[in-house]
Amino acid sequence: MDSVLIIVDKAPYGYEDTFSGFYVAIACLNRGMKADVLLVGDGVYSAIKDQEPGGSVDYPKVGELSYLIFPEGSIFVHKESMQDRGIEEDDLVEAAQIINDNKLYELISSKTKNTAFIRI
């Protein structure tokens, strides 16, 4: 395996999944692997800039983690998932790359047999 695509479909707070996905991508990049993150469904909330997790638990800010992935890895945000949730392009961190359904298909189908797909 020489690359990984982390697919995040859960909201960033209330679950550890999103943080785990971002940290796995960061760890892969640190080891010289190609790593990208795909945000779909509620996962698109992870790309909103200037987030404040709030609450009594001191969660890291997901938006800040995105800058540890970019530019070596990419953060793809599914456009239709954004639209379904009323999220605009200006709401996103600058590292986010918006992709539509056609680009999503191309992204997944272009991955080689040496790519691990991890759904978080």
Image (cartoon, helix red, strand yellow):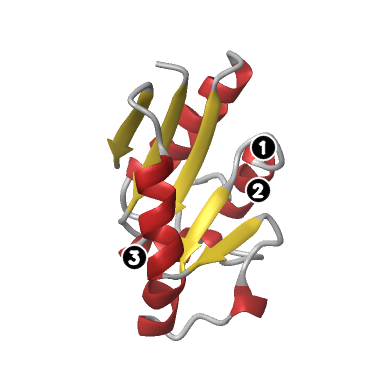
Q: Residue at x 55, y 27 (%)?
A: 34
> Residue 87: x, y in percent?
50, 80
Residue where numbered disc 2 is placed: 64
Are the two marked residues, 2 and 1, in contact with CB atoms closer than 8 angstroms?
yes
Residue 16 visible in the picture: no
- The residue nearer to you, when weighing 61 against 103, is 103
Q: Residue at x 34, y 65 (%)?
A: 42
The vertical placement of 14 against 52, above or below, is above
Local crowd size for mark 2, using a 10 Å CA cut-off: few (<14), some (14–19), many (≥20) = some
Residue where numbered disc 3 is placed: 42
Amino acid under disc 1:
Leu
Residue 70 found in image quarter: top right
Q: Report the Cα–Cα distance between label 2 and label 1.
A: 7 Å
Amino acid under disc 3:
Asp
Local crowd size for mark 1, using a 10 Å CA cut-off: few (<14), some (14–19), many (≥20) = some
Q: Report the Cα–Cα distance between label 2 and label 3.
A: 18 Å
The vertical placement of 36 against 23, above or below, is below
In the visual, does 42 lie left or right of 3? left
Q: Residue at x 56, y 82 (%)?
A: 88
Amino acid under disc 2:
Glu
Does dot 2 land on a helix, a strand or a loop?
Answer: helix
Residue where numbered disc 1 is placed: 68
The vertical placement of 44 against 26, above or below, is below
Are the two marked residues, 3 and 1, in contact with CB atoms closer than 8 angstroms?
no
- The residue nearer to you, when weighing 57 against 3, is 3
Local crowd size for mark 3, using a 10 Å CA cut-off: few (<14), some (14–19), many (≥20) = some
Residue 47 visible in the picture: yes
> Residue 109: x, y in percent?
35, 46
> Residue 85: x, y in percent?
39, 81
Please state, as top left, top right, bottom left or bottom right, where the N terminus lies in the image: top left
N-terminal of the pair, mark 2 or mark 3, is 3
Please state, as top left, top right, bottom left or bottom right, where the C terminus lies in the image: top left
